[in-house]
Image (cartoon, grey):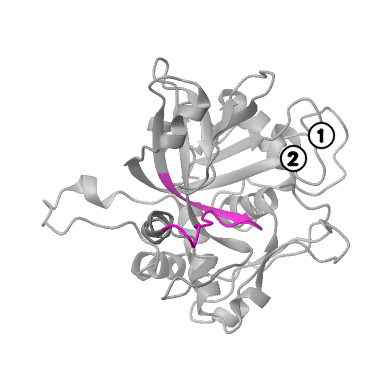
Amino acid sequence: MSASSARPSRRHLLAGSAGLALAASAASLVSPTRAAAAEPATAELFKLKPPHLLEAETLVEYLRLRTGQWDHNRYNVEQADGENLGRTQVTWGRAGHPEEFENLSQCASFMTALLEHSYGTGTAYGWATSAYFDQYFPPKDGSTRTSSYPNAEDLQAGFLNASAVPHFDPVTKPVNLRPGDIVAWDYDPAVKSTPYTGHTVMIRSCLGTFSSSVDSKLGITGVVPHLFQIVDCTNSPHGGPDLASQSSIDRYRAYPDSRAEIADDNSTYTEHSGVGYGHMVFYADPGTDLFAGYRWSVNSATPQPAVAQPVTGKKQIAAGRVNAFLV
């Protein structure tokens, strides 16, 4: 899902303290289930979230308060006869004003806009600018960039080389992913796919392992399926229950997507596009712990093989962690 080809101006009106307060207090409808038993009050239970994750949650939660949310929160598909990836608009409004929040983007353009809003011009950090992304996330195929944002395959290539990218560290193993980490993959490393080069998501929470009978389709004995709640912008929510299967419905209800709705009586399932929360599985090789693939949702029937370096028949995947929150 590629980035857009034009960059409009975006307002940066949300005060940092207000954004932190909202994200801290908002009770997400798809928050991970917590244990019923009391837990010890240790610092480990109250880890700070990185600013860009807080800002992403602020955007999602305010959009969910908007009347007619899906008129203001959409994946950028504007033409009946095909994709129009020519416009991206991600707007953070003022605290208490959900009507000022807007999202029209794709996966990579949303992620880039989020980083610019959190760490770009006008913030205390100042590094996430168009010049920064042009320098450190150039077109993967070596061409001249004609769009205003890196696309998913550009982000994947940058994260693969994250040790040489200021403000990012590489994350090579699913077990090491943490909230705020960004994962990107290239659907077809051999060619530049149109209009979707790949996809990119941000980790919101780590939910342990989630085994399924379909894991064996990767062809790796002992592969380890790590489950995560993620934040992304997509036109295909991470869910898709089979309404004829109660077990499929139960899995979806346990690990839903905020952009999809299932009727109380399980009779209908409706999907929307845009930015929101979903659930994905990232696989680890049992011998190296490195990325071995992913599954789009807990109900996906086919896992996708993915590794860092080019391998025939496998997607390329890489992850990066923002490492500089201080000025």
- State left or right for residue 209 relative to residue 215: left
- State left or right for residue 254 relative to residue 88: left
Q: Are marks 2 and 1 in contact (CB under 8 Å)?
A: yes
Tell me the chief SS of the magenta region: loop
Q: From this view, report whether residue 138 is shown above or below residue 107.
A: above
Between residues 216 and 29, which one lies in front from this camera angle?
216
| Residue type, mark 1 in image | Lys
- State left or right for residue 144 relative to residue 33: right
Q: Residue 4: image x %, image y %?
A: 78, 53
Number of residues whose C-alpha sits closer than 10 Å to that of mark 1, classed few (under 14), some (14–19) or many (20 or more): some
Distance, label 2 to label 1, CA atoms, is 6 Å
Could one spot residue 176 in this view of the protein?
A: no
Instruction: Please tell me whether residue 321 belongs to the stretch shown in magenta.
Output: no
Between residues 324 and 39, which one lies in front from this camera angle?
39
Which of the two labelled residues, at mark 2 and mark 1, occupies the earlier sequence position? 1
Instruction: Please tell me whether residue 243 belongs to the stretch shown in magenta.
Output: yes
Q: Residue 221: image x %, image y %?
A: 41, 19
Residue at the far top: name it. 287
**Residue highlighted by disc 2:** 197
Could one spot residue 125 in this view of the protein?
A: yes
Look at the image and give the residue range highlighted in magenta. 228-245
**Residue highlighted by disc 1:** 192
Q: Residue 61: image x %, image y %?
A: 48, 70
